[in-house]
């Protein structure tokens, strides 16, 4: 396994950025279109409603006018003008005539009124000369009809049944003088068209809003999908993975950006290969003389055995070991490493790492305590993670005073992640020191290389995890390591466990703290 990237249980930063971009596109697009669509739909509905009302008014006025003309042709204008309360037979005949008009045209009601808005003839059971108070709302239209002798129509109104209606007024004349008005109330069959128009406009608006939303989501996906891939590629490159090419999926500006990122990756890969070759050459040139020096120091130690000057030979050997460690840590930090991912018990890892630091713990009089849930597993390269944990535990021991304790714990922070905490109650670090500890070659030790903690974080991040430090002066330091857990990784073999136990010893890695 050669995993790279940054582990964040909340999701990667580019996923959150892409989600924000999609939200902005959706809100921005709909924020402009929806008000325009709402205004356009409302204006269209109002215009259509007015036209339909006008058409309905003309039709009702026409029916009232036709009815009035027919009555005048039979001399009913004079009969209406001479109606009395006891003119039962005339009123009955006129009511029958108005009912035929009502039924033939699908109207709600037809009646004849005088200038005082009283009932003369009505298709409904109304007493003779009963006043119509509801017609007072149409006083203007009624006055115009009496004065001009031309048919008029009222505004739309709602009856007691909750349905919208409209009235048409037409003058009924006798010898050229207007004696009454024929009033036609539009039926629901007419005004229902207005309601249906409103529902139709609402349905069309809803469909347009839905289509706009779908198109906006599709457009945002078209824009953000390549950006997501490009952002993920930038994450891989930033994490050190230069082997995966950046695909140009589209022939547009985003595709041009992908090509630019791919050219950058190729240039970085070329420079990285040159760096690897240079480091290999440096290591070869340094290790050869160091190997020779070790041989000569060993011979010198044999020659000086029992001589007081042998202490100088021991000092030379110690310095040579330090130089070897500097070279090894420098190369480990600078080069790419291939890891073998396996699954193993957290208790086993803690036991080996803490046992390796047992010599320092005894020397400094510090107690190491561990806390792990039985059966809890970790995944990753066992040797690399053990080296990281040994380094961090040794740092904690070095920072602790005699009689103090270092606590190491492993917990499951979700099904797919694990967390390792190493805490001490030592002197702690100032904020400015904590801010520098991850910087390569920064160290607070006289013989430190400044690569121990940067190398540890590199290993953790190569595993897809991350690590951070919190520290308070006079209180102590806590190192939190977060690692992803792969339950599909193969179990670590027994042979590998035996080999690991054979190689376990006191660790002399870089310490900062």
Image (cartoon, rainbow, N blue to C red):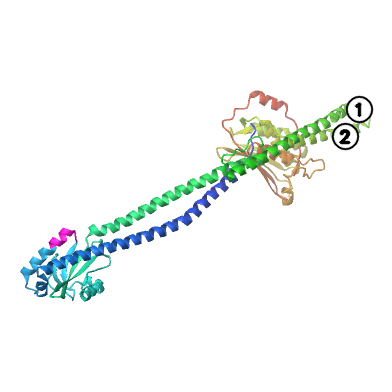
Kindly identify the residue that appears in the image at 67 percent across and 25 percent down. 496
Q: Report whether 130 appears left or right of 251.
A: left
Quarter that holds the N terminus = top right
Label 2 to label 1: alpha-carbon separation: 12 Å
Q: Total label count? A: 2
Q: Nearer the viewer, residue 357 or 242?
A: 242
Q: Is residue 481 visible?
A: no
Return the x and y of residue 352 as percentages of the image width and height. Answer: 69, 31
- When the figure is inspected, residue 261 is found, relative to residue 205, above or below; the finding is above
Q: Circle 1 is placed at which residue position?
A: 300
Bounds of the magenta span? Answer: 99-107
Among the 4 quarters of the image, the one containing residue 345: top right
Q: Nearer the viewer, residue 234 or 356?
A: 234
Q: Residue furthest top?
A: 495
Q: Circle 2 is placed at which residue position?
A: 315
Asked whether 103 falls inside the magenta stretch, the response is yes
Quarter that holds the C terminus = top right
Q: Looking at the image, tell me whether mark 2 or mark 1 is earlier in sequence order.
A: 1
- When the figure is inspected, residue 492 is found, relative to residue 221, above or below; the finding is above
Q: Nearer the viewer, residue 299 or 488?
A: 488
Q: Residues within 10 Å of mark 2 (few under 14, many from 20)?
A: few
Return the x and y of residue 298 as percentages of the image width and height. Answer: 88, 27
Q: Which mark is residue 9?
A: none
Return the x and y of residue 151 as percentages of the image width and height. Answer: 22, 69
Q: Residues within 10 Å of mark 1 (few under 14, many from 20)?
A: some
């Amino acid at each position: 396994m050669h995993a790279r990237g940054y582990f964040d249980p909340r999701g990667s930063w580019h996923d959150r950025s892409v989600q924000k971009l999609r939200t902005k596109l959706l809100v921005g697009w709909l924020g402009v279109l929806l008000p325009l669509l709402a205004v356009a739909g409302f204006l269209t509905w109002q215009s259509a409603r007015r036209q339909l009302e006008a058409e309905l008014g003309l039709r009702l006025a026409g029916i009232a006018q036709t009815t009035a003309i027919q009555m005048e042709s039979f001399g009913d204008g004079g009969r209406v003008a001479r109606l009395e309360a006891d003119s039962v037979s005339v009123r009955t005949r006129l009511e029958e005539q108005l009912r035929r008009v009502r039924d033939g045209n699908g109207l709600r009601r037809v009646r004849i009124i005088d200038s005082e808005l009283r009932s003369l003839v009505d298709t409904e059971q109304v007493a003779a000369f009963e006043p119509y108070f509801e017609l007072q709302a149409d006083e203007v239209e009624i006055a115009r009809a009496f004065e001009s002798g031309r048919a008029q129509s009222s505004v739309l109104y709602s009856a007691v049944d909750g349905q919208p209606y409209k009235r048409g007024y037409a003058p009924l004349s006798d010898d050229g003088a207007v004696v009454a008005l024929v009033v036609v109330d539009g039926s629901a069959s007419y005004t229902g068209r207005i309601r249906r128009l409103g529902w139709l406009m609402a349905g069309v608006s809803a469909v347009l809003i839905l289509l706009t939303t779908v198109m906006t989501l599709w457009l945002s996906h078209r824009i953000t999908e390549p950006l997501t891939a490009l952002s993920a590629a930038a994450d891989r490159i930033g994490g050190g993975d230069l082997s995966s090419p950046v695909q140009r999926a589209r022939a547009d500006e985003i595709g041009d950006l992908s090509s630019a990122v791919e050219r950058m990756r190729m240039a970085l890969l070329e420079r990285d290969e040159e760096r690897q070759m240079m480091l290999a050459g440096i290591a070869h040139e340094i290790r050869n003389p160091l190997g020779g020096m070790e041989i000569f120091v060993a011979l010198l130690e044999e020659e000086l055995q029992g001589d007081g000057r042998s202490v100088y030979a021991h000092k030379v050997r110690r310095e040579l070991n330090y130089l070897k460690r500097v070279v090894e840590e420098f190369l480990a930090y600078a080069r790419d490493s291939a890891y073998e991912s396996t699954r193993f018990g957290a208790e086993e890892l803690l036991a080996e790492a803490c046992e390796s630091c047992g010599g320092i713990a005894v020397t400094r009089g510090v107690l190491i305590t561990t806390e792990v849930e039985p059966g809890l597993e970790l995944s990753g390269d066992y040797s690399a993670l053990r080296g990281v944990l040994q380094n961090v535990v040794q740092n904690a021991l070095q920072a602790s005073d005699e009689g103090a304790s270092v606590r190491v714990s492993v917990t499951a922070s979700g099904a797919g992640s694990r967390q390792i905490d190493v805490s001490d109650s030592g002197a702690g670090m100032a904020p400015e020191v904590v801010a520098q500890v991850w910087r390569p070659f920064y160290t607070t030790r006289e013989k430190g290389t400044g690569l121990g903690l940067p190398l540890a974080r590199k290993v953790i991040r190569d595993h897809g995890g991350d690590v951070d430090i919190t520290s308070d002066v006079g209180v102590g330091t806590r190192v939190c390591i977060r690692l992803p857990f792969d339950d599909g990784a193969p179990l670590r073999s027994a042979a590998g466990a035996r080999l690991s136990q054979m190689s376990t010893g006191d660790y002399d890695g870089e310490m900062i703290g």
